[in-house]
Image (tube, rainbow, N blue to C red):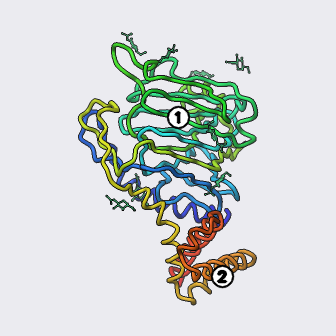
């Protein structure tokens, strides 16, 4: 286990404990539910061992890990199904996912938009079919024939990152692969005289893997998943290097007015979203926390980081402490965001390290 995966596991453990206690699903088609927190803006997350999931996301099952240039999910043993999801909602939008799917029979990688009333917009990859990607959608959780499609693509889904982009507005849904339009679904295509199955309510983003080929799954699922999974041949890894979300609505939160589940019934509550505030302040607060540490703690952190990592950390921190003296405003316009994120994540790790150090004493 690398230092970074240890950190991720700690974060995930802390988060999943909380989740288990507070999970309160509310079905807006039958109940009056609390409003959904909005994203209300656009943001790009570039994941790496120096740029972890921030608090606008929760790991809801298993653990996440990181590489130098991506977030990594793994199936290592029976029934592993690591998943993380956004704490924010998007009410129509454009999502761009840079994904390298996991290989293997029975191994499913997925990126899903899902609303509280179970509208859903999916990308799914079957690990044994690396020249194909599947698109699918659900309206109000109802399974209908022919909503899922399989697309043949050029290149390998499991050997390289590709750009999977979803465009979702009130009139149409599009699935794009590396700049090529694979599929369009219009509102009309998903609507007839008995109703509409067009996804149209505020969605969270969920990224995950699951063993569709586990022997406990129904036959049909195992066949769809490309056969039974061989756990001994794992681990099976899925990678996400970049994720962008553009919320077409701007506001603080989204609430259901009545129980129809139509887009017309969604109230966009004006105000600044918590997610946006978090994204704007997460960097600053971590840097400040570091600055507030006593020099004794900092030395302890250098010591526990050990070797090359400690030297790297010191160089980075020296750079940034010096930089901060130049003034925060100037620092922000340095247009060196990568360096900034890297440093902050180092600080965050340092924070965790410091907690461990304190607890050991
Ligand atoms: C996400 O985790 C945090 C704790 O880290 C918790 O307060 C929050 O309720 C969780 N949110 C969701 C949507 O599960
Ligand atoms: C996709 O490729 C498979 C063979 O690899 C072929 O049988 C199938 O017809 C192709 N589908 C389309 C839509 O081209
Ligand atoms: C990803 O694909 C979308 C849709 O074609 C495109 O708009 C976007 O620019 C692409 N992103 C990158 C980084 O090329
Ligand atoms: C989908 O709807 C569009 C118009 O919105 C129509 O032109 C097209 O034929 C429809 N396609 C299918 C498969 O129903
Ligand atoms: C409308 O579409 C649904 C789902 O495809 C189907 O079950 C239903 O029979 C259709 N109703 C009519 C009146 O065509
Ligand atoms: C489907 O299920 C039957 C009975 O449980 C089993 O004998 C058969 O091997 C299964 N087929 C596949 C492809 O898993
Ligand atoms: C939203 O943020 C802007 C700028 O940060 C601020 O001027 C405005 O007062 C905020 N609005 C609310 C409702 O908090
Ligand atoms: C994220 O990665 C993309 C593509 O590598 C790059 O264009 C963009 O500047 C990066 N954004 C940040 C905030 O690092």
Question: Residue 187 at x, y = what percent?
Answer: 43, 23
* Real-space Cα separation, disc 2 to disc 1, in angstroms: 43 Å
Question: Residue 352 at x, y = what percent?
Answer: 54, 73
Q: Secondary structure at mark 2?
A: helix
Q: Earlier in the sequence, mark 2 or mark 1?
A: 1
Q: Is residue 41 left or right of residue 179?
A: left
- Asked whether mark 1 and ligand 3 are closer than 8 Å, the reply comes as yes
Question: Residue 53 at x, y = what percent?
Answer: 54, 57
Q: Which mark is residue 167?
A: 1
Q: Secondary structure at mark 1?
A: strand
Which residue is identified by label 2?
318
Q: Quadrant of ligand 5?
A: top left
The foreground one among 34 and 165 is 165
Q: Is residue 71 left or right of residue 142?
A: right
Location of residue 321 with respect to 275 vertically, above or below: below
The foreground one among 282 and 210 is 282
Location of residue 325 with respect to 283 vertically, above or below: below
| Quadrant hosting residue 45 | bottom right
Question: Residue 159 at x, y = what percent?
Answer: 75, 41
Image point 41% across, 25% down: which residue?
A: 142
Image point 27% across, 43% down: which residue?
A: 33
| Quadrant hosting residue 209 | top right
Disc 2 to disc 1: CB gap under 8 Å:
no
Q: Is residue 274 left or right of residue 307?
A: left
Judge the density around disc 2: few (<14), some (14-19), many (≥20) Cα neighbours within 10 Å: few
Quarter of the image that includes the N terminus: bottom right
């Amino acid at each position: 286990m690398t230092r970074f995966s240890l950190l991720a596991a700690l974060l995930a453990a802390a988060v999943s404990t909380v989740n288990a206690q507070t999970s309160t699903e509310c079905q807006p088609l039958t109940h009056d539910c609390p409003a959904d927190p909005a994203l209300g803006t656009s943001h790009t997350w570039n994941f790496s061992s120096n740029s972890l999931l921030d608090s606008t996301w929760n790991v809801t099952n298993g653990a996440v890990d990181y590489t130098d240039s991506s977030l990594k999910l793994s199936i290592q043993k029976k029934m592993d199904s690591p998943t993380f999801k956004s704490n924010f909602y998007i009410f129509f939008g454009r999502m761009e996912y840079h994904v390298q799917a996991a290989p293997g029979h029975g191994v499913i990688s997925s990126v899903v938009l899902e609303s509280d009333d179970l509208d859903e917009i999916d990308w799914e990859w079957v690990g044994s079919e690396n020249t194909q990607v599947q698109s699918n959608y659900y309206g109000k959780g109802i399974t209908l024939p022919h909503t899922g499609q399989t697309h043949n693509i050029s290149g390998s889904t499991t050997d390289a990152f590709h750009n999977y982009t979803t465009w979702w507005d009130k009139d149409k849904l599009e699935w794009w692969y590396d700049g090529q339009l694979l599929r369009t679904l219009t509102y009309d295509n998903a609507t007839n005289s008995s109703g509409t199955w067009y996804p149209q309510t505020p969605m969270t983003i969920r990224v995950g893997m699951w063993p569709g080929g586990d022997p406990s799954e129904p036959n049909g699922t195992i066949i769809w998943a490309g056969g039974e999974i061989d756990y001994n041949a794992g681990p099976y890894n899925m990678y996400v290097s970049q994720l962008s979300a553009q919320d077409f609505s701007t506001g603080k939160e989204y609430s259901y007015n009545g129980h129809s589940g139509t887009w017309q019934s969604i109230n966009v509550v004006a105000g600044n979203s918590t997610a946006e505030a978090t994204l704007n302040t997460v960097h600053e607060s971590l840097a400040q926390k570091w600055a507030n540490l006593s020099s004794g703690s900092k030395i302890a952190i250098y010591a526990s980081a050990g070797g090359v990592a400690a030297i790297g950390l010191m160089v980075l921190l020296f750079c940034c402490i010096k930089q901060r003296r130049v003034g925060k405003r100037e620092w922000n316009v340095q247009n060196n965001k990568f360096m900034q994120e890297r440093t902050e994540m180092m600080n965050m790790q340092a924070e965790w390290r410091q907690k461990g150090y304190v607890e050991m004493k």
